[in-house]
């Protein structure tokens, strides 16, 4: 038997290897010696990610022309405004049901309802435009 020193992930192990004569057997080879348990890898220490400010929901973006978008997929339960209505910041525009919960979609700013892009009972995906406001 020959003894070898093996280093794995910084841990040193002594391993004995025996040379076997060739055998004519249909039986699979079995392990005769106990092996050392594999060491648990240590997680690499990565530098902390730089802190970034949390993203605000895309409810009022200049590129979308004052569009109020769905923050999550769901079904429109009710619409509380009509085209041409004046709304104030925080006023409920519609109710969106998502995961058995009713979520109020509120006006992000004061304005006038320019267009309503959804109807009651319609399913929407996250990011779909619900209402368009004008200042």
Image (cartoon, rainbow, N blue to C red):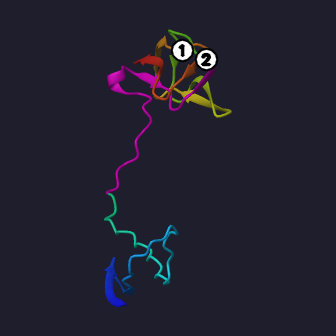
Q: Is residue 40 above or below residue 80?
A: below
37 on left or right of 62: right
Which residue is pictured at 32% across the width and 23% down the height? Answer: 63
Look at the image and tell me in which quarter the N terminus lies. bottom left
Which residue is pictured at 33% across the width and 89% down the height? Answer: 2
125 or 39: nearer the viewer? 39
Which residue is pictured at 54% across the width and 29% down the height? Answer: 73
Magenta residues?
50-77
> Where does residue 75 sit, x and y in percent of width and height?
61, 23
> Where does residue 8 sit, x and y in percent of width and height?
34, 78
Q: Is residue 29 above or below residue 13?
A: above
Q: Which residue is mark 1?
A: 118
Q: Do callouts 2 and 1 mark residues in contact (Cβ within 8 Å)?
A: yes
Residue at the farthest right position: 100
Q: Which mark is residue 104?
A: none
Residue at the farthest top position: 84
Q: Is residue 78 above or below residue 98?
A: above
> Where does residue 48 sit, x and y in percent of width and height?
34, 63
As for residue 103 lying within the magenta part, the answer is no
1 on left or right of 108: left
User: Quadrant of residue 18 in the image?
Assistant: bottom left
Q: Distance from label 2 to label 1 (Cα)?
A: 9 Å
Q: Which mark is residue 79?
A: 2
92 or 127: nearer the viewer? 127
Image depth: mark 2 or mark 1 in front: 1
């Amino acid at each position: 038997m020959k003894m070898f020193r093996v280093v794995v992930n910084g841990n040193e192990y002594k391993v004995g290897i025996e040379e076997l004569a060739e055998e004519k057997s249909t039986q699979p080879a079995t392990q005769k010696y106990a092996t050392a348990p594999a060491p648990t890898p240590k997680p690499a220490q990565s530098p902390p990610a730089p802190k970034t400010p949390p993203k605000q929901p895309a409810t009022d973006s200049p590129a979308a022309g004052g569009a109020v978008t769905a923050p999550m997929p769901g079904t429109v339960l009710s619409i509380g405004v009509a085209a041409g209505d004046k709304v104030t910041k925080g006023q409920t525009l519609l109710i969106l049901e998502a995961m058995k919960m009713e979520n109020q979609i509120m006006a992000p700013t004061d304005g006038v309802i320019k267009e309503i892009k959804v109807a009651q009972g319609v399913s929407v995906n996250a990011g779909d435009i619900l209402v368009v406001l004008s200042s």
